[in-house]
Image (tube, grey):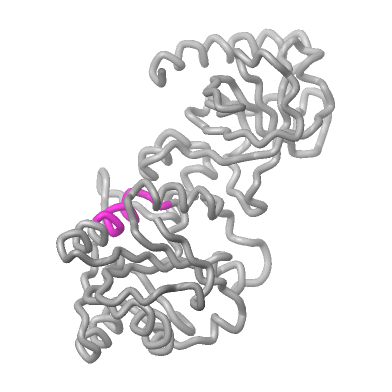
Amino acid sequence: MDVYRALTEIPNLPGSVVTMGTFDGCHRGHQEIIKKVVSMAVSKGAHSVLITFDPHPRHVLQSGDKLPMLMHIDKKLEILKSLRLDTVLITPFDDSFSKITASQFLSDVVVKYFDPTTVIVGYDHHFGYEREGSPEFLKTYGENHGFDVDVIPPISDENVRLSSTHIRNLIKNGYVRRASFELGWVYGFKAKVIHGAGRGKELGFPTANFIPEEKNQLIPVNGVYFIRGRINGNNLYGMCNLGIRPTFDETEFVMEAHFFDLSSSNIYGKIITVEFLERIRDEVKFSNSTALIEQLNKDKQICMRLMQKYK
């Protein structure tokens, strides 16, 4: 898969099959669109092309708190590559680019560089200044400029439409297992291990404190989770606490993971992957450290039993 981050880098790719969008999460609905792009391109002997944006347009267009992201751009590219796309254009999204009209974007980017035979988008895709470009707008433009437009209807499961917004809400409320099902991959992210207060070691459960690589990463709701980590090329299971450690009257939010079979604690500064498999319980304030240790042992037993489902 060829990845381009500037229009000047792109070779001429006439007759392409193109899709476009933010694709945050690359969930199962997104994957259906991408699979159709790839299969149609293969049948036509053409290039499959995906145009996406970085940063997320809402990070530029909206003030205040940033939209929490389901994935880092590198994770997005990893999934896109697994879907066998030929070409990905990552368009830098800034205030200047946000002023480009839908027609300008189609003529100056999509048609000029990819000369599509077909453009495939989701039912709710909008683009261009003030979201002028809708599927209906795109169909009319395609009719006037010689390419077909295929609009993919929503993908539903148990009468729930799969969407990045719905998946964000699941994760915010701790339903990580369901979120992973709708994503089509286990929710998690790469993170850097940092030094913590050392409380876990004092309790007999040494932990690795971590911070996500993606600065706007969506974090599940506070609580204890059964997790899987990838450390130094090895898959390890463990449990993770997200919260403020109320038993010790602390107020700073921390993310800390205890891995069951980690032979070395020398992972400070390393980049690890943390995947949230299931939520075990809420974060609780215990009367003393003895009560906390007793609960941690119970949590570990629950996780050890769950492990059999994932091995």
Instruction: Name, please, the residue furthest toward the front.
Output: 11
Percent across and percent down for residue 33 are 28, 59
Q: Is residue 223 above or below residue 200?
A: below
What residue is rendered at 38% in x and 55% in y? 163
Q: Is residue 104 above or below residue 76?
A: below
Numbered range of the magenta stretch: 26-35
Locate the N terminus by quadrant. bottom left
Closer to the camera in the image, 286 or 302: 302
Closer to the camera in the image, 168 or 74: 74
What residue is rendered at 55% in x and 21% in y? 236
What residue is rendered at 38% in x and 18% in y? 309
Q: Is residue 202 above or below residue 145?
A: above
Please check the rendered image and state whether residue 31 is part of the magenta-colored stretch, yes or no.
yes
Dominant secondary-structure state across the stretch colored magenta: helix
Name the side, left or right, on which 139 lies relative to 285.
Answer: left
| Picture quadrant where residue 193 is located | top right
Percent across and percent down for residue 51 are 41, 68
Name the side, left or right, on which 87 lies relative to 292.
Answer: left
| Picture quadrant where residue 102 is located | bottom left
Locate the C terminus by quadrant. top left
Q: Is residue 202 above or below residue 111?
A: above
Instruction: Name, please, the residue furthest toward the bottom.
Output: 144
Percent across and percent down for residue 103 are 38, 89
What residue is rendered at 42% in x and 60% in y? 2
Q: How many marks?
A: 0
Please check the rendered image and state whether residue 212 is part of the magenta-colored stretch, yes or no.
no
Percent across and percent down for residue 90 are 49, 66
